Image (cartoon, grey):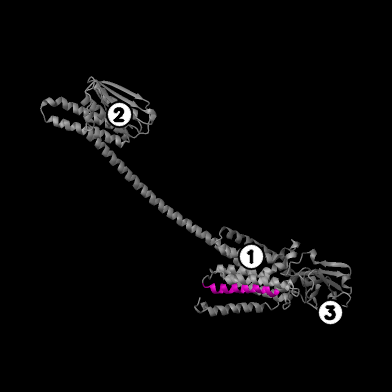
Amino acid sequence: MSTWLRSFPVRAAAALLCVTCAIALARIDLPLQRLISADAAVIEEVQLLLPNEDGRALSLPVYWRSAEKEAQTRRFRIELPQTAMSSAELHLYVPYFEQRLRIVVGSTILYDSDDIRFWSGPVGYQSALVPIPAIAARTDGLELLVDTGIVPRGTLSSVYAGPRTAFLANYRLRGFLEERIKPMLYGAQLLLAIISLGIFWIRPSDRVFGWLGAALILTSVVGNGVLMSYIPSLESILREVYFLAPIVGMALLGFTVSLAGRKMPKFAFFLFPFLTFVSITLALLPEISVVDAVLLISIPGLLIAICWSFFVLVFSYGKRADTVVVLFLIGQIIIIYGVSHDLFVRLGQVEDGLLIARISNALVMAGMAAFLIGRQTEIANSLDAAASNLRARLSEREEELRSIHLQQQENDRQRTISAERQRITSDLHDGVAGHLATIVALSETDETAVAEIGQSAKNALVDLRLVLDALSLPEGSIGFALGSFRERCLLPLERLGIEIEWSINGLPEQMDISRETILNILRILQEAVNNAVRHGRPKTLHVNIDGQGGQTLRFTVENTGGIPFAPNDIQSGLGLESMRRRAQAIGGNVTIEPTTSGARVTLSV
């Protein structure tokens, strides 16, 4: 778009020109009368029959307003032209009338519009195409009775007489617009209103749907005359609902402003309710009817709002140059034309008898439908994009977590291997390494140390097998480990003449205990037995294991019949530090008690 088209004066002038042209064109009659064939004769004069008076000549079309607000009837007499009498099938055609029409010959009613459908309110007229019997055509004249209800306005157009085919195109077009298009648009309008309000209920932050729903539902309320044929009781509020016309305009303006990405002017919240208030106040005056108040205040207030909305769209077109905005721009110009045209028809300045305001909003409704579809498509696309982005981020995060997990597993494996190596090294250092050092030292002396070398080698082998047994057993196999300990460490002592008393009480077959804990237990028991044999020279060695139901393990090693244990040795060593360190590593504790002929070592885990 060129820069000069974006300037404020150019846009304002263009918008003003469009509005002026629309209002000016609304003053021109629509060429519907051209659809009536030249074979038809037009009746442009009637006699108004008044009580106690001769007929008063009037020119058609005629518009009137009743002084009273209750139902009234006006009687018109027409004379059929001689040119129409020759028609084989004479029909009388009334292009438009308001509100109820009856065609009477003498006391016979030839036609009653209420038998077909009720008046649809000020938003529409009705048409009548009535066959005239030959006997009626030869009478002095036909009477047309036009009734008005609580809306004290009546209308009777020019009347045509001739063959049915002369009026069929015009009659069908008017009937299609009044009886088909307007109800269809009304239903579509209600559907869009429900959808918009439903979306606003779910997403109250999206105010554009709130304004759209309000505009549509208020328009449906004002145009409820479409339902008169189905709900006749609506006639009681038919006049008063038009007081809401400025509020309808305010809702439309709110939608347009929200669509343009702007805020609703605070002044608008005062102006349009004020116009409604003024219209209602004027209608309360005895000199002014409801219809006059609506035509003077409410409908112009609606026009102001529509023009304002049009200007807002014009100045926001550069920001949102899309199909929806274009549809609304064209649609609002058509609405301005339609509302202005209907206003001129009501004021008697246009005589085509076609009220098109209810039809002129079709393009705006198409724009609203396009907006709803576009906005929901935009939301759906945004959700799809967000979901796709989320899936991609989740995939990246999963890959990152998988990499971290694999690295953590590798680190844990390396730590486990390192800890296992350290434990095995410690076990071998405490057991096998000590025996090997003894063997090396003895091998450097004379031959008398051969027996001691052999014994140290055996002890080293026992230590090594004890470590291997503990590491090769399944987790929790404390019973098998103790059996191996008895076989490898205690049974050889019996060959030395030491009596072994072995007892196990309450030890479950399986316990939740690790290989590392089992190995530390065996090492502590081994150290206790070695100390008892080496330093206590016992005659009897008591080894008691109490499972205590699997909650706590208590191991007791007691030597008797030998050298009493010196209390000072408790603090001085003898492998006690190693036993305490191992007990602490597995969450247990070791106690040593001297006895009369030995000592007692207790391990609790």
Where 230 sits versus 334, above or below?
above
Residue 13 in picture, x, y percent from top left: 57, 80
Residue at point 50%, 60% (across, down)? 382
Front residue (pair 34, 149): 149
Q: Which residue is mark 1?
A: 216
Label 2 residue SS: strand
Front residue (pair 584, 155): 584
Residue at point 10%, 27% (across, down)? 446
Q: Which residue is mark 3?
A: 57
Where 213 sits versus 137, above or below?
above
Q: Sequence order check: which comes first, mark 2 or mark 1?
A: 1
Report the span colored magenta: 295-318
Q: Which residue is mark 2?
A: 602
Residue 311 in picture, x, y percent from top left: 58, 74
Query: Going by the image, does 320 lie left or right of 357?
Result: left
Question: Is 309 within the magenta?
Answer: yes
Crowding at label 3, few (<14), some or many (≥20) Cα neighbours within 10 Å? few
Q: Quadrant of residue 235?
A: bottom right
Q: CA distance from mark 2 to mark 3?
A: 135 Å
Query: Going by the image, does 152 lie left or right of 472?
Result: right
The C terminus appears in which quarter of the rendering?
Answer: top left
Inspect this view and state whether residue 329 appears: no
Residue 387 in picture, x, y percent from top left: 48, 56
Query: Of the residues shown, which amino acid type is indicated by label 1?
Result: Leu
Label 1 residue SS: helix
